[in-house]
Image: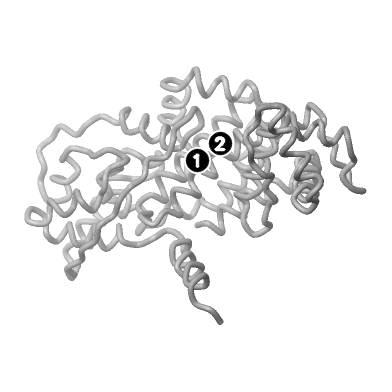
Amino acid sequence: MSHTLHLVVIKALEQDRIVTSLLSKARNISGYIHRSSKANNRLHELQTQLNLPQHTLITDIKTMWNYTFYMLQRLVEQRRAVQIMTQESNMGRAPTVIYPNEWGLASDMLTLLSPFEEVSRALSKHSASISEVIPLLHGLCSIIRSLHLGAGEESEDVSDDCMAGDDDQDVTEGQDQDGAAESRETLGAAARKLAANLSKELQWHFEPIFANTTLLHATLLDPRYKASCFPNSVDVDALKRTLCHRLELFDTVAARARITEETPATSNTSVLSFLHKKKSATPMRTHLPTGDVEAYLADGDISLSDDPVKYWSGKLQFWPKLTHFALQHLFCPPTSVQSERVFSTTGNVVSP
């Protein structure tokens, strides 16, 4: 998941000459100040004079797209100091002067890339589960699509197969009309083109994800989401029938775990905020349950910040087979980030 998200962002960024030119200047500035002690001291002086946060600039890493986001974020934060420094010195041979329209593009890029950073961070937590993949991607696709279409461009490849459906547009444009519409209207021409490229890359890379039965079952069995955060193309009734059939063949395996959840911050373009609104817009079930699966779906939902494993621990005596089946899915991590962190930590304490 992390690798594919990286490909989506990097390929979209590489398709526009204006964007690549801005990123090149950002790398030149950040790299120069990072390498030069004199430039670094001058930056600290200007930060003190201008009352800016005492932060160093960040250089991006080619294999990790989110560092490109952090590099732009830090440059925008230190804009006034950077502008003075580029006027005082050319910082080497490469062009480093960022013009006003490029600063505007940098801010727009932060708006577009912040949902990707939010999803990457959520999928990289130690408590992340494959049950979060489809809801988070669905929210991400819907937000980027709304930013793209809301900018007034014609979409050539809009599809309900992996993008948001009519109900999602209602949520975005109805319940969050003021905030999202304001974000869309402020995007410049280069940012609108980037939004279109991001939307196309998302559809190209992630369309098969929304038909993956294992991921669909994991989301359905996560009490934070159940059936409320699926795209329109998902046949929930067929998914429930498949789940019931698999339960009949399921060999229960006892499993115990404890997972804690962190609550990320929300904003107008926050994926978590989108999922909150979609959950509240989905009507509650009213008919009587006819089995374990229906009884679970009719049971009350839990908050997106709650622990799904704690929920299932309390249901073990009521739905033992369904509980074991759910925990098998919820225990699967969506990325290898956590295991890689273990190796990194070990490298800090064990010498060659």
Foreground residue among 24 and 189: 24
Q: What amino acid type should be assigned to the residue bearing mark 1?
A: Leu
**Which image quadrant is residue 107 in?**
top right
The disc placed on residue 144 is 2
Give the image location of residue 329, x and y in percent: 30, 60
Colouring rule applied to residues = one colour
Give the image location of residue 234, x and y in percent: 37, 45
Q: Residues within 10 Å of mark 2 (few under 14, many from 20)?
A: many
In the image, residue 31 sits, relative to residue 48, either above or below, namely below
Foreground residue among 104 and 230: 104
As helix, strand or loop, the secondary structure at mark 2 comes to helix
Give the Cα separation between the discs numbered 1 and 2. 6 Å
- Looking at the rendered image, the quarter that the C terminus falls into is bottom right
Do labels 1 and 2 touch, CB within 8 Å? Answer: yes
Q: Residue furthest right?
A: 93
Answer left or right for 240 relative to 109.
left
As helix, strand or loop, the secondary structure at mark 1 comes to helix
Answer left or right for 136 relative to 68.
left
Q: Residue furthest bottom?
A: 352
Give the image location of residue 312, x and y in percent: 18, 52
Residue drawn 53% across the image and 79% down it: 351
Answer left or right for 39 relative to 142.
right
In the image, residue 252 sits, relative to residue 133, either above or below, namely below
Pointer 1 residue: 140
